[in-house]
Image (tube, helix red, strand yellow):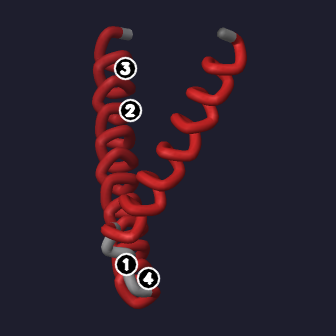
Amino acid sequence: MAEVKKDNLFKKIARYFRELKSELKKVVWSTPKQVAKNTLIVIACVVVVGLFIWVFDFVAQALITAIINLAH
C-alpha cells in the first residue's frame, strides 16, 4: 500500500510540473522596453501622489497651527 501511494505521489508531482511548463508557454512576457516604460509610469505616479500628500500635510499643518494660535 505504501508503494502505491509513493508512486501515485510521484505521478502527481510529475503531472504538476508538466502542466506548469505548459502554462508558462502561454504567458505573454513583456519586452524590456515595455517594462522600462511601465516602471517610469509607476515612478511618476509615486512622485505625483507623494507631492499631493506633502501639499495636504503642509496645508493641514498650517491650518492646525493657525487654529491653535487663535485659541491662545
Most foreground residue, 39 or 31: 31
- Quarter containing the N terminus: top right
Which residue is nearer to you in this view: 22 or 29?
22
Q: CA distance from mark 1 to mark 3?
A: 56 Å
Q: Residue under label 2, please give it.
A: 61
Query: Which callout, 2 or 4, points to the residue nearer the camera?
Result: 4
**Mark drawn on residue 36:** 4
Name the amino acid, label 3.
Asn
Seen at 62% across and 20% down, the residue is 4
Residue sitting nearer the eye, 28 or 69: 28
Calculate the distance from the C-alpha at mark 1 to the C-alpha at mark 4: 10 Å
Q: Which mark is residue 69?
A: 3
Q: Is residue 37 left or right of residue 16?
A: left
Tell me the kind of residue under disc 4: Ala
Q: Which residue lies under the disc numbered 1?
A: 30
Q: Position of residue 11 (x, y in %)?
A: 56, 38
Examine the rendered structure and indicate whether residue 15 appears above or below residue 47: above
Confirm or deny contact between disc 1 and disc 3 (CB under 8 A): no
Element marked by disc 2: helix
How much space separates mark 4 and mark 3, taking CA atoms?
A: 49 Å
Alpha carbon distance from label 2 to label 3: 12 Å
Is disc 3 placed on a helix, strand or loop?
helix
Contact (Cβ within 8 Å) of mark 1 with mark 4: no
Pointer 4 local density, CA inside 10 Å: few below 14, some 14–19, many at least 20 = few
Give the left or right position of residue 14, taking residue 26 as reference: right
Query: In this picture, is 38 found above or below 65?
Result: below
